[in-house]
Each structure stands twice: as C-alpha cells, then as structure tokens.
Amino acid sequence: MNDYLVQLSNNTVARRGLKMIGAPTPLALARASGPYQEKPLQGKRLLFAGNGFLAAAAKTALTQAGAVIGDPAQAGEEDRFDGIVFDASGVQQPSDLRALYEAFHPIMLRLAENSRVVVLTGLPEAAKTSGEAACRRGIEGFTRSVAKEIGKRGSTANLLYVAQDAEDRLVMPLRFFLSEHSTYVDGQAVRVTAAAKAPSPLPLSHTLADKTAIVTGAAGGIGAATVRRLAAEGAHVICVDIPPTQETLDAIAKDIGGSALALDVTADEAPAQLSRFVAERGGVDIVVHNAGVTRDRTLAYMKADLWEQTIAINLEAILRIDAQLQQDNNLNAQGRIVCLSSIAGIAGNAGQTNYGLTKAALIGYVEAEAPRLAARGITINAVAPGFIETSMTARMPFVMREGARRLTSLSQGGQPEDVAELICFLATPGASGINGNTVRVCGQSLVGA
Ligand code: NAD
C-alpha cells in the first residue's frame, strides 16, 4: 500500500506546499537493497565517543565493518556524519553524563539524512551503585529523546544494554543498527548478554547458509517478505499458511527454492505434521511464528468465537508447535525462535482485548522460555510491529490509518520488508546475544512509547 504523503513529500514543489500548510513531510527512507555484506558500513563516516568497557570491542567491530571513524574537530563545517556511536558504559555518576552533551550537542545539526545513532551502556541491574544504575537507565531516556529529535530526517537512535561479559556479541548488532537493514527500528532498548553460546566462526554474509526455517503465515504481507529475506541469506524456508492460500504459497516457495506446507496451525495434527516435515531435513534451525489474525470488537460486543479464534491462532498454536518440536528433538541447537507480537500487546488497544492479550502473552512467553533455551544456544525473541503497510492495516478506517502513520518519529508507516529485516537479524548466528527481548519495529510509534 502506498503512502501518498511520502510520495508528495519527495517532490520539491509539493513538499514546499505541504510545509506551508503545516502538514508532515515524511522523508523517503533509505533501505538496504540486498542481503548482508561483509562490509555493510563501507565508507560510512561515524563519530565515536565515550569510553567504557565496550569501547575497544565496538571500535574494532566498526572498522571491520568498513566504517570510517571521523573526528568532528578535524572535519569541515559542511561535512556530514552518517552516525554516532557513544559508549556510555563508563558513566558511573550524574556528573559523568555531561560527556553525552559534549559529544552530541556539536554534531546534532551535522547528521546526514537517514543517519544512525547507537548508544551503548551496561545493564542497569549489574551496576555497582544505585547512582550508576540510575545513570544507565537514564541513558535510555536520552536515546529515545534523541530519536524523536532526528526522526524527521529519516534518522534513528537505539540503545544497547550490554552485559559485562558480552562485548564480543556486539559485532552483528552494531552492523544491524548502524546500517540500512534497521530502517524502521527506532527508539529501542535492546539487551545483549552472553547467556546463549556464540557460534564460531561468525558468518557475516550468507549468514543462514545450511539453515532450515519455518515461517507461518507465509502468504501474508510480513510473512512473504520474511520468507524472501531469510532465503536471501541462504536459508531453506518452509512456507506455511492455511490451505486456501496453497496457490500463493506454492508460487512463493518456488520463487525462493523453498518448500510449501499448507496447514492451519490450529489443527490438532498441525504440530506433529510440522515436526515430521522438518525431521526429514535434519530438524529446524529457525521458527518464525508470524501467522496471526485480528478479530476486533469492543469487549461488550465481542462474540465468544472471535475471542477463541484469536487465542487459538495467535497464542495456543505457537506454544503447541514449539513444545512438539522440542519433544521430538527437532529444534536444533543454536536455533532461533521469533514470535510476532505487536505494539497493541504493549500499549493495549480499544477493540482488541483478544488481540492485545495474545500479543502481550507472547512477550511473557519469550521472557519465560529464553533462559530455558539458552543452555542449547537457542534464542527466542519477540518482534512488535507498529503500523505496517499490509492487507491487515489496509482494512483500518482512513482516519485511524492516517493517525497511526503520522504519530511516529519517522512520520510514516513501515513496510513488511522492515519487519522482515528485524526478524532476519534476530535469526542470524550473530544475534546470539539477544535473548528474551521484545524489539519494536514501529518507527518509534507514540502508541505505548
Ligand atoms: P496478513 O493478514 O497479511 O498475514 C497473516 C497470514 O497469516 C495470512 O496469510 C493468513 O492466511 C495466515 N494465517 C492466519 N491464520 C492462520 C492459521 N490458522 N494457520 C496458518 N496461517 C494462518 O498479516 P500481516 O500484517 O502480515 O501480519 C503478520 C503478523 O504480524 C501477525 O501476527 C500480526 O498480528 C503481526 N502484526 C502486524 C502488524 C501490521 O501492521 N501489519 C502490526 C503488528 C503486528
């Protein structure tokens, strides 16, 4: 679905007109055009500031990714920076926070369009003093506020809370959050720990070669984009959706050299059927629980069958499939599970008591499963999309749709490909440090922000 305002805003004359009437002028966002490259930050000019236990590992990761670490004092007035990485893990007390001001203040107006800010700090609960914990948590508020200031230029800011022993897990997260693969992920705080074993060696391109993935709801907007993204990284993808979508499913699977499996995930036999199917391929490495429905009515008017159906598809089927795969030993070590939650699961939404319940339940589910699965190097995370341009959101009334698009820092909705990028990142071996997180892909939507 096209966003007319993004199209108009990128025409110089129309943009001027929109500005005159005070309308938003969302920038066309830069997006990655292919799979991960060995040097995804090639030629990007970044400012690196701050100094703590993460600085050395982060700088090495950046230069290996091809970034040029520039010094604003040496750069010309007109020179622009493609991003800032600030290591705040050395901040211990309020007076140390001045370093954030000193690094960011001179460069805020010198950030290029579509630039990236990544702030690093330690885990608040691992701080030595309450003051240090307060500062670490405060840095989240700083980062989210920076994101709101730079969003109108298509730029994003995200925070990584990193455990003391997890600095070697930064390579892939830095590549993701500083590149055009993370376009619509904005204002997020992601925890990086060493709980799940890291793979060695770490593949930086063709990252999913030899992996088998299941994507449910593969015929839909986000599902189809995810299937293509995982296949582009080299995975064999089993595309699952309900039987009426068989033709679409076959076409997608053929296109990517994957397999099609038409089944209703709520059917009694579905978990066993899926498990048998992956057993023939030596088990499954990546499971993306994407199939989901909205059956909206305010609670006073909601029929019991709409309630039941939503719980069955969006929640119960996921628990049953994961349990079956594990019971049959068909979920491989170092595996990755990604559940599609929603910002409605974080903030709640009128008319979506059933949907909001299931999407919040998935957040609880990944938090509960993460420590259990970490022993086998498996991670489980949730992705919470905001307003994404798919058939699901095309059904929304115009005024609500417009509100959802514009009430974001980037002033526009996301594309299914943006969600697919985040899912794919979490499925890579290099995302081993991210476990039990819920990451929003919502352009920093004000809903639940
Ligand atoms: P979509 O309606 O385009 O696709 C959903 C797919 O799931 C469809 O192809 C459908 O046939 C399939 N499906 C439904 N019931 C199924 C079942 N019982 N068994 C197997 N497949 C089934 O929706 P989408 O926008 O691509 O959403 C994908 C996921 O992302 C959903 O879980 C949704 O809740 C979540 N999400 C979407 C948005 C958004 O803005 N589009 C926002 C937040 C969360």
Image: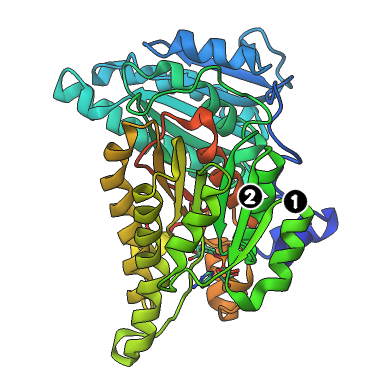
Q: Is residue 226 left or right of residue 329?
A: right
Q: Is residue 280 above or below residue 354?
A: above
Q: Residue at x 62, y 66 (%)?
A: 220
Label 2 sits on a secondary structure element that is strand
Identity, as a three-letter code, of the amino acid under mark 1 = Ile
The spot of residue 204 in percent (x, y) is 63, 24
The spot of residue 214 in percent (x, y) is 55, 52
For the residues marked 1 and 2, what is the alpha-carbon distance in whole angstroms?
A: 8 Å
Label 1 sits on a secondary structure element that is helix
The spot of residue 122 in percent (x, y) is 32, 23
Residue beneath label 2, please? 237
Between 198 and 190, the one lying in front of the other is: 198
Query: Label 2: few (<14), some or many (≥20) within 10 Å?
Result: many
Between 409 and 65, the one lying in front of the other is: 65
Identity, as a three-letter code, of the amino acid under mark 2 = Val
Residue beneath label 1, please? 256
The spot of residue 109 in percent (x, y) is 61, 30
Q: Is residue 332 above or below residue 104?
A: below
The tag on residue 377 is none
Q: Residue at x 54, y 46 (%)?
A: 423
Q: Is residue 211 above or below residue 317?
A: above
